[in-house]
Image (cartoon, helix red, strand yellow):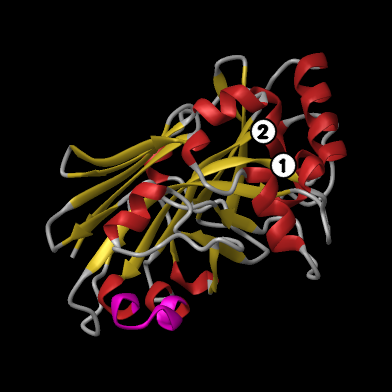
Amino acid sequence: MRLSRFSTENGHRILASHRGGWTPVSGITGHEGPIRLVDLLDASRRRDLEALLESRPAPEPVDVRLDEAATVVEDGDIWGAGLNYRGHSQDLQAQQPSSGPGSYLRPRSCLISNGGTIELPSRSRRVTAEAELGLVIGARCKDVRRDEWRSVVAGVTAVLDMTAEDAIRENPRYIPWAKGFDTFCSVGPQIVTLDEFDDDALGAVRVSTVRNGEVVASAPVSDMKYDLGYLVEYFTAGRTFMPGTVICTGTPGAAEISPGDRVTAVVEGVGTLVHTVK
């Protein structure tokens, strides 16, 4: 199942992909209650929606332009794993941590919708863009065991993550500062539920950072040093995660960006984010 979120004059509209087209969730007979994307992340709510879509005539499908979709993040934090692909650690001429991934927490104020413009801050002379796979938490959870990670993850999404790289080259402790600027994160344009991927299929998903049509870095999810189950266990250890929280799982490689560039995050079978730079 695929879910997306679109801005409207009256707020946001939640859409579900069904029978080859997109359907407004608010138009599905029998689906009651407030319509927020985060409300549909819980497994039981998703199953109810799927049953309604299958058992009742679908409302008139709508045309959807995913290149204009709003960020899928509504509630929850945005966590990130650093240096999780060997290729990226080589980019930064840094050694991968041996006791766990690098990590950071970023503000939601950094988020932009798909197709939005990335604004380079005057406080940095080298900004990079990095494609990533994102895990979207679907249930309130804490201390999740590695082998139970699927029970708390609603689905996967694409992420484009920007970094003021000159700052963290100077001092790795600057990571949250270097990633928190406005327009420095895009998440979406859709959430794909985990029932569409078994472990092998998810491991084969390729994540690519593309600049001006050229693939700068690309690798499958299986190339991560710390796998998805490890990341969920690592980040939820000792802390409560709420539905809608996103774990950005690391990038295969970064592209330095400049004004006028067009940068793309491609997560095969999951989603594509495209942004211009000014």
| Residue 3, placed above or below residue 132 | above
**Residue at the spot 33% in from the left edge and 37% down from the top edge:** 218
**Residue at the spot 29% in from the left edge and 82% down from the top edge:** 170
Q: Which of the two labelled residues, at mark 1 and mark 2, occupies the earlier sequence position?
A: 1
Quadrant in which the C terminus is drawn: bottom left
Q: Which residues are magenta?
A: 168-175
On the picture, is 197 further left or further right than 54?
Answer: left
Magenta-span inclusion, residue 173: yes
**Residue at the spot 65% in from the left edge and 53% down from the top edge:** 231
How many numbered marks, from 0 up?
A: 2
Magenta-span inclusion, residue 73: no
The amino acid sitting under disc 2 is Thr
| Mark drawn on residue 193 | 2
The x and y percentages for residue 254 are 29, 54
Q: Which residue is mark 1?
A: 154
On the picture, is 26 further left or further right than 110?
Answer: right
Q: Disc 1 versus disc 2: distance between alpha carbons?
A: 6 Å
Discs 1, 2 touching: Cβ within 8 Å:
yes
Quadrant in which the N terminus is drawn: top right
Label 2 packing within 10 angstroms: few (<14), some (14-19), many (20+): many
The answer to whether residue 188 is visible is yes
The x and y percentages for residue 17 are 60, 26
Label 1 packing within 10 angstroms: few (<14), some (14-19), many (20+): many
The x and y percentages for residue 176 are 47, 77
